[in-house]
Image (cartoon, coloured by chain):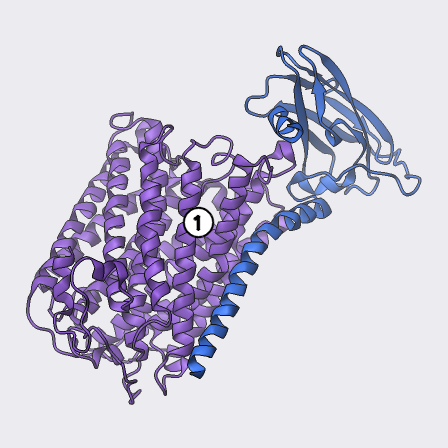
C-alpha cells in the first residue's frame, strides 16, 4: 500500500520537473535578451540612451566608426548610410543619416535591427536617437532620411580603434497587418 | 510478425498472453512492450537506412545524378530525425522495458498502462512525420537540427506536421522516462540497494532524468516555432525583435543532453557484456556510476560548443571549450574500466563480446575526434564539414547502434529460449564492422580537406573517398538484412538456451528460466548475491 503512495509522490515530483523545464525553455527567451543587453554579447546594442552626467570628451582619441546597411532576404527597399565612415571623439555627440526608399508600388513597414562588431564594443555605443527604435512606414516610392545620434562612451577600451555598426532592414508589413486586423 | 513472436512466450504460466493482434494493442506486459519497441525501432532503422543509402548513392560520384538538391535536403533531415528519435531512442526504451524489471526483481514496470500509451504514440508520430514526404513542398528539409529561420520563414508547409510529430515523440519519451524512474525507485526487490543495481539500470536511471529534463525544452522550442509560424510572434525573427541565434541556444540546451541520452544506456549494455565474456567482475563499479552521473551533469553546461562559429565572446568560447574537454575525464574513466575488466580475463569472443569490444575501440575514436572539435580555433575549420559527420557517426553507429546489437545478441537467448546462430552472428559482426569503418573513416579525410556536410554535390578532389564511403554504406546497410534473418531464425528455433545462457553471466535476469516466462518475479527474489557481476 505504501508502495503505491510512494510511487504517486515520485510521479508528482517528476511531472513538476517536466512542467518546470517546459517553462524554463520559454524563460530562456527573456534571460537571453537580458544577458545580451547587459553584456553586449552577440553585438546587441541597448535601447535609447539618456546621459546621466556630462560626458567627458576625449579630444586626444579618435575612433573610426563604419556604417553598414543591408536588406534581409526579400526586402526590396533601397537602404544605405549617407556617410560610410566617420572618425569621432569618444564622449562627443555625433549625427549620422541613413537613406531609405520604398521602391515598390505599395505601402510597406520596415524594422531595422542593429549589430556592433567587435562585440565587446557594443556596450560602449550609446544611441540617443535611432530610426531602429521604431518601425518605419513608407508609402509607395516614398523616400526618407533617417537620423542616428550616438555617443561613443569615453570608457571604450583602448584596443578598439574601429567599430562597425551594421543595420539589417526587415520587412514587417505582414506582422503589422496581423496586429492591426 | 505477431505469429512469429507468439512463440516467444509459448510457455507462459499463470495468465498467458491474449491471443491475436489485440494482445499487442492492449498489452501492459513489460516484455510485450519491450518487444514492440524493439521491432518498431528496427523498422525505423531500416527506414532511416534507406534514406541514408539514397544520400550515399547521390554522393557516389560528383555532380547530380539521382536526387535533386530539394529531395537531398529532405533525405538528410529525415534520416537524422528518424535515426535519432525513431531508431536509437526507442531501441533503448525497448531494452529498458525488457530488462529493468528482470534486473531489479520487479514483476513489471510501475505504470503498465502508461507504458502501453508511450509505445502506441510512436507509430502515429512517425506515420505523421513520414507522411510529409507526400505533401506539397515535401518533407522537412532544414536539417535534423531545424535551425530557425530555415524551419520557420523558409520551411515547407509540412513543418506544422513535423512540430506535432516532435511533440508526440516528446510526450512518449517523457512518459517512458517517468515510468523508468518510478520503477527503479519503488519496485526494487528487497536488498537491491541502489549501489547493487546492474549498470544498465543505473545508466537508464540517469538517462531517464536527462530525458525528463530536456524533452520539455524541445517541446518548448518547437512550440515557439509554431507560434512564430502561425500566431505572429517573433521569438526567432530579428525583424520583430527576436533572434535566430536564440533558437540555437534553446535547441542545443536540449540537443547536447540528447546525445548522452543516446549513449549512456549503451555504456550500461557494454558494462554488462564485457564482464560476462572476460569472466571477471566489472572493474570499478562505483566509479562507473559516478562517471555516468558526471557526464550527465556536464552535458547541461556545454551546449554552445555546437555554436562556436555563430559569434560568441572569447570568454564564452574558452569556457565552453574547457567544459567540453572536461567530459573526456569521466568518459576516460569508463574506457579505462572496460579495458581493466578485460585485463587478464579468460576472454571468449562470442558475437555480443565482439560488438562490445568494437564499441569500446570505435566509440573512443569518435570521442577523440570530439575532443578535436572542442578546440575552438580548430573547430572553425571543422565546423559543418564531413569531419563532424564522421565524428558523430562514429559515436552513434559503432557506438549506440553496435551496443544495441550487442544487447540483442546477448539477451535474445533469454527472450526466445533459443541460441542464435553463432556463425551467422559473427559474419554479421564482421560485415558491419568493416562496413561502418569503410563508410565513416574516409569522411574524416574529406572533412579535413573541406567538404561541407548536407550538400548533394562536391568538388572533384573529394570523389575517390566519397566513392569508398558509399561502397561501405551499402555493405553496412545490406548486412543488416542478415541481422533481421538471424533474429527471426532465433525466434523460430535453435539450440535451447540454459537459464544462465552464458557461462560468466551474473544478475537476476539469468536466474529465471529461458525463455523468460510471461510473468516473472511475481514474488520478489530473496538472494541479491547475483545482482551484478
Please name the residue that numbered disc 1 is placed on.
Answer: B167
Report the chain shown in blue: A
Q: Residue B429: x and y, percent?
A: 17, 57
Q: Residue B410: x and y, percent?
A: 20, 68
Quadrant (top left, top right, bottom left, bottom right) of the N terminus of chain B:
bottom left
Asked whether the viewer can see residue B305, the reply is no
Identify the residue shown where x is 12% and y is 77%.
B498
Q: Decide if residue B148 is on the left or right side of residue B397.
A: right
Q: Decide if residue B103 is on the left or right side of residue B316.
A: left
Determine which quarter of the picture holds residue B47. Answer: top left
Q: Residue B1 or A137: which is nearer the viewer?
A: B1
Quadrant (top left, top right, bottom left, bottom right) of the C terminus of chain B:
bottom left
Determine which quarter of the picture holds residue B311. Answer: top right
Determine which quarter of the picture holds residue B286. Answer: bottom left
Q: Decide if residue B403 is on the left or right side of residue A158.
A: left
> Mark 1 — on which chain does it sit?
B
Relative to B435, say whether B260 is above or below: below
* Residue reaching furthest to the right: A54
Q: Residue A71: x and y, percent?
A: 61, 23
Q: Residue B252 or B525: which is nearer the viewer?
A: B525
Q: Residue B291: x and y, percent?
A: 44, 70
* Residue reaching furthest to the bottom: B526
Report the chain shown in purple: B
Identify the residue shown where x is 75% and y is 42%.
A123
Q: Decide if residue A67 is on the left or right side of residue B149.
A: right
Relative to A157, say whether B170 is above or below: below
Other-residue count near label 1 (Cα within 10 Å), few / some / many at <14 / 14–19 / ≥20:
many
Relative to B429, say whether B198 is above or below: below
Asked whether the viewer can see residue A158, the reply is yes
Amino acid at each position: 500500500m505504501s508502495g503505491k503512495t510512494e510511487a504517486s509522490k515520485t510521479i508528482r515530483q517528476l511531472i513538476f520537473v517536466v512542467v518546470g523545464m517546459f517553462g524554463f525553455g520559454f524563460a530562456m527567451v527573456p534571460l537571453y535578451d537580458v544577458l545580451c543587453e547587459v553584456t553586449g554579447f552577440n553585438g546587441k546594442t541597448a535601447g535609447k540612451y539618456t546621459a546621466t552626467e556630462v560626458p567627458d570628451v576625449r579630444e586626444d582619441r579618435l575612433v573610426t566608426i563604419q556604417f553598414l546597411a543591408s536588406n534581409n532576404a526579400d526586402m526590396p527597399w533601397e537602404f544605405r548610410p549617407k556617410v560610410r565612415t566617420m572618425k569621432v571623439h569618444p564622449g562627443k555627440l555625433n549625427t549620422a543619416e541613413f537613406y531609405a526608399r520604398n521602391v515598390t508600388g505599395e505601402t510597406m513597414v520596415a524594422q531595422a535591427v542593429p549589430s556592433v562588431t567587435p562585440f565587446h564594443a557594443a556596450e560602449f555605443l550609446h544611441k540617443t536617437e535611432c530610426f531602429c527604435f521604431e518601425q518605419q512606414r513608407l508609402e509607395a516610392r516614398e523616400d526618407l532620411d533617417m537620423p542616428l545620434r550616438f555617443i561613443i562612451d569615453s570608457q571604450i577600451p583602448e584596443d578598439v580603434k574601429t567599430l562597425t555598426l551594421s543595420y539589417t532592414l526587415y520587412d514587417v508589413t505582414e506582422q503589422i497587418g496581423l496586429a492591426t486586423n | 510478425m505477431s505469429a512469429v513472436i507468439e512463440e516467444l512466450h509459448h510457455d507462459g504460466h499463470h495468465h498467458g498472453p491474449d491471443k491475436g493482434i489485440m494482445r499487442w494493442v492492449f498489452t501492459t506486459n513489460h516484455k510485450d512492450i519491450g518487444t514492440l519497441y524493439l521491432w518498431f525501432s528496427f523498422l525505423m532503422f531500416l527506414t532511416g537506412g534507406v534514406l541514408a543509402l539514397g544520400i550515399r548513392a547521390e554522393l557516389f560520384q560528383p555532380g547530380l545524378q539521382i536526387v535533386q538538391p530539394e529531395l537531398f535536403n529532405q533525405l538528410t533531415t529525415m534520416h537524422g530525425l528518424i535515426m535519432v528519435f525513431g531508431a536509437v531512442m526507442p531501441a533503448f526504451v525497448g531494452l529498458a522495458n525488457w530488462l529493468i524489471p528482470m534486473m531489479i526483481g520487479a514483476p513489471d514496470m510501475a505504470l503498465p498502462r502508461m507504458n502501453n500509451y508511450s509505445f502506441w504514440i510512436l507509430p502515429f508520430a512517425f506515420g505523421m512525420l513520414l507522411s510529409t514526404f507526400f505533401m506539397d513542398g515535401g518533407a522537412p528539409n532544414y536539417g535534423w537540427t531545424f535551425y530557425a529561420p530555415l524551419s520557420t520563414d523558409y520551411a515547407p508547409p509540412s513543418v506544422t506536421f513535423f512540430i506535432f510529430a516532435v511533440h508526440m515523440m516528446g510526450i512518449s519519451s517523457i512518459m517512458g522516462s517517468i515510468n523508468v524512474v518510478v520503477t527503479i525507485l519503488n519496485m526494487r526487490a528487497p536488498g537491491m540497494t541502489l549501489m547493487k543495481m546492474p549498470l544498465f539500470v543505473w545508466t537508464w536511471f540517469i538517462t531517464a532524468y536527462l530525458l525528463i529534463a530536456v524533452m520539455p525544452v524541445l517541446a518548448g522550442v518547437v512550440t515557439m516555432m509554431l507560434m512564430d509560424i502561425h500566431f505572429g510572434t517573433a521569438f526567432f525573427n530579428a525583424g520583430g525583435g527576436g533572434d535566430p541565434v536564440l533558437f540555437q541556444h534553446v535547441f542545443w540546451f536540449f540537443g547536447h543532453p540528447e546525445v548522452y541520452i543516446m549513449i549512456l544506456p549503451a555504456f550500461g549494455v557494454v558494462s554488462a557484456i564485457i564482464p560476462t565474456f572476460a569472466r571477471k567482475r566489472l572493474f570499478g563499479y562505483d566509479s562507473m556510476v559516478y562517471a555516468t552521473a558526471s557526464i550527465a551533469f556536464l552535458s547541461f553546461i556545454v551546449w554552445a560548443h555546437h555554436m562556436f562559429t555563430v559569434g560568441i565572446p572569447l570568454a564564452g568560447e574558452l569556457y565552453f571549450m574547457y567544459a567540453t574537454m572536461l567530459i573526456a575525464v569521466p568518459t576516460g574513466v569508463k574506457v579505462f574500466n572496460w579495458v581493466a575488466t578485460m585485463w587478464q580475463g579468460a576472454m571468449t569472443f562470442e558475437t555480443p563480446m565482439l560488438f562490445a569490444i568494437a564499441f569500446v575501440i570505435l566509440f573512443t575514436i569518435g570521442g577523440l575526434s570530439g575532443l578535436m572539435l572542442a578546440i575552438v580555433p580548430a573547430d572553425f575549420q571543422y565546423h559543418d564539414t564531413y569531419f563532424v559527420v564522421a565524428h558523430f557517426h562514429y559515436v552513434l553507429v559503432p557506438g549506440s547502434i553496435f551496443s544495441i546489437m550487442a544487447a540483442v545478441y546477448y539477451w535474445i537467448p533469454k527472450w526466445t529460449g533459443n541460441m542464435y546462430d553463432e556463425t551467422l552472428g559473427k559474419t554479421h559482426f564482421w560485415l558491419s564492422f568493416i562496413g561502418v569503418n569503410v563508410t565513416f573513416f574516409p569522411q574524416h579525410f574529406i572533412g579535413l580537406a573541406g567538404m561541407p556536410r548536407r550538400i548533394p554535390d562536391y568538388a572533384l578532389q573529394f570523389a575517390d573517398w566519397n566513392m569508398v564511403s558509399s561502397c561501405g554504406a551499402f555493405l553496412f546497410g545490406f548486412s543488416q538484412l542478415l541481422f533481421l534473418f538471424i533474429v527471426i531464425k532465433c525466434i523460430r528455433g535453435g539450440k535451447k538456451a540454459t537459464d544462465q545462457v552464458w557461462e560468466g553471466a551474473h544478475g537476476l535476469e539469468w536466474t529465471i528460466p529461458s525463455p523468460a516466462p510471461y510473468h516473472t518475479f511475481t514474488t520478489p527474489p530473496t538472494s541479491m548475491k547475483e545482482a551484478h557481476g
